[in-house]
């Protein structure tokens, strides 16, 4: 296979759209699937061959399907639901599952794909919308060596780092989930530190600057605590995403019989923030679980 | 004052030695105090005016004293213990307290220094031995505006970032303690994530590489989890340092009546690691609180 491959991205959200645009840029025959007509229109204007509500009408054209829907339930719905895609794809089509899901779901999806002679790559991604649009995502994947070889031109187009974790389906998902453990704990720890600073009457802008120039910094602190300093909780990624992802983290730990003192605490914090009404706000709004402090207000408000 | 100032560094450990060497390099008349004769010899060879077990014999020469001893008890001992330094210094000598101490201790030390007409700068530092040696530390300080002005040439020589948190003694210490909250939680979270990866049979070197190239990264993860990947727990900074520093974090929270769900959990992890016999090992040895996993061994062992 080469750039004459046909690639379909299912789920044209911020990540999926970036991936699809990178595929077009790299010269692939690119297809897109989404329920949102604006996303479909945008992709067609960028040069996609087709973009529809399902991939069924062009399923026989496809060599690679990349799934970037929200969760495992949606992955299963797309592939195996009523008139699901799996039954329509050619044998040996590669199905790259890039949603954040549990290892157990990844294995179940793989077994079902095998019934249709389809090939799974367990391939979660990281990097955010901007990196996706620039073809610079990080992919952490597991699957057959031959699958990695066949899909390499696509990976080259959409990612700057591709990690082959092993052949066993589920390892890719597990690495992503462990990554999310760190991402979630770092946001919650950043919130805890900034809340304590507010309680101690430290100006949060100074606290932010000190930390980002010292060894206490994290990628998430630098990115998310800026929203707290600015008092702007417009969601880039919502509190409820981490209720889901840290839930997957804790499910994974349970299935491995392993204690997670920090990640379980962070999940409690995001869950409380969601129940207090902040689930759709930016994940930095987890700081609102702390009472008795004054946080910066958004400028002009 | 200018570079003709006389500066004495008390505590020639890795940070203090770096600070003293930076002062010599910048042309200050530099003095050093340490109980360790090798450290004193090294500083004399580098060009210090004098280096002794106490600063008493040259106390009247000094314009600035920088304290980089281990904790508040040592700061008090040096200044106010038997034949303590405070009674020997000239009035208006600046005493820059750079050890990590509580705001309460900082205020108590300030009140005692005032009795001797000495001027305190509450000025903890961050950055590690290499940055200290290169004059590139981060200083987070509080004190009188005039003190910052007088000491500026010294700060220019030893630090790349100087944050003036405010005039109230204790604010500098509090910022440092909140910084240590993040540093400690990030090490413990890194250990928790790597332990889960080991349990899931993810190669730790791959897990390390994925995280350090993605949004789950932190300064501490990148620096400390390398020691876990290498199986090398030779202490750069020991578990017991974080038992102390996270203890200060939790004391600070208690004095402000504030909950710290993550930092209290991280303190428990470091405390358990210390009680299990790992207190003098590298702080990344906090991962040893997790049973039922195989961690990488040091090469050649």
Image (cartoon, coloured by chain):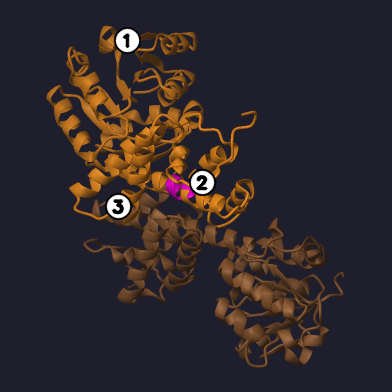
Chain colours: A orange, B brown
Task: Identify the residue under disc 2.
Answer: A221
Disc 3 on helix, strand or loop?
A: helix
Gap in angstroms between the C-alphas marked 2 and 3: 23 Å
Residue found at x 77% / y 63%: B148
Residue B210 in sight in this render: no
Q: Using the rendered image, report if marks 1 and 3 lie on a common chain.
A: no
Percent of width and height locating residue B133: 66, 69
Q: Provide the chain ID for the residue under circle 1.
A: A
Q: Provide the chain ID for the residue under circle 2.
A: A
Q: Which residue lies furthest to the left in this view?
A: A115
Mark nearest the camera among 2 and 3 is: 2
The question of residue A273 being in magenta is answered with: no
Q: Provide the chain ID for the residue under circle 3.
A: B
The magenta-colored residue range is A186-191
Would you identify the image quadrant in which residue A111 lies? Answer: top left
Task: Identify the residue under disc 1.
Answer: A53
Task: Identify the residue under disc 3.
Answer: B197
Residue A207 position (above or below residue A80): below
Disc 2 on helix, strand or loop?
A: helix
State left or right for residue B93 relative to residue A92.
right
Closest to the observer: A61 or B73? B73
Q: Using the rendered image, report if marks 2 and 3 lie on a common chain.
A: no
Residue found at x 39% / y 19%: A12
Which quadrant would the C terminus of chain A be assigned to in this image? top right
- Which label's residue is closer to the chain start, 1 or 2? 1
């Amino acid at each position: 296979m080469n750039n004459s491959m046909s690639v379909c991205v299912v789920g044209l959200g911020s990540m999926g759209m970036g991936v699809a645009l990178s595929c077009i840029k790299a010269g692939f025959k690119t297809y897109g699937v989404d329920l949102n007509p604006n996303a479909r229109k945008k992709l067609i204007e960028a040069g996609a061959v087709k973009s529809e509500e399902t991939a069924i009408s062009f399923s026989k054209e496809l060599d690679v399907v990349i799934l970037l829907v929200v969760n495992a339930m949606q992955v299963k719905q797309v592939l195996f639901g009523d008139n699901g895609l799996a039954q329509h794809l050619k044998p040996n089509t590669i199905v790259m599952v890039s949603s954040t899901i549990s290892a157990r779901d990844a294995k179940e999806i793989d077994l079902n794909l095998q019934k249709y002679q389809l090939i799974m790559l367990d391939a979660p991604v990281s990097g955010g919308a901007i990196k996706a649009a620039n073809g610079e995502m990080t992919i952490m994947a597991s699957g057959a060596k031959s699958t990695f070889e066949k899909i390499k031109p696509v990976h080259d187009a959409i990612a700057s780092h591709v990690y082959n974790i092993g052949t066993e389906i589920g390892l890719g998902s597990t690495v992503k989930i462990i990554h999310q453990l760190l991402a979630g704990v770092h946001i919650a720890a950043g919130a805890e530190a900034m809340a304590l600073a507010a309680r101690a009457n430290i100006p949060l802008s100074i606290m932010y600057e000190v930390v980002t120039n010292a060894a206490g910094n994290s990628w998430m602190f630098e990115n998310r605590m800026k929203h707290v300093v600015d008092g702007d909780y417009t969601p880039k990624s919502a509190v409820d995403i981490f209720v889901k992802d840290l839930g997957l983290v804790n499910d994974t730990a349970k299935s491995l019989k392993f204690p997670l003192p920090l990640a379980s605490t962070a999940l409690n914090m995001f869950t409380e923030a969601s129940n207090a009404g902040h689930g759709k706000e930016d994940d930095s709004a987890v700081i609102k679980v702390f009472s008795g402090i004054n946080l910066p207000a958004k400028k002009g408000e």
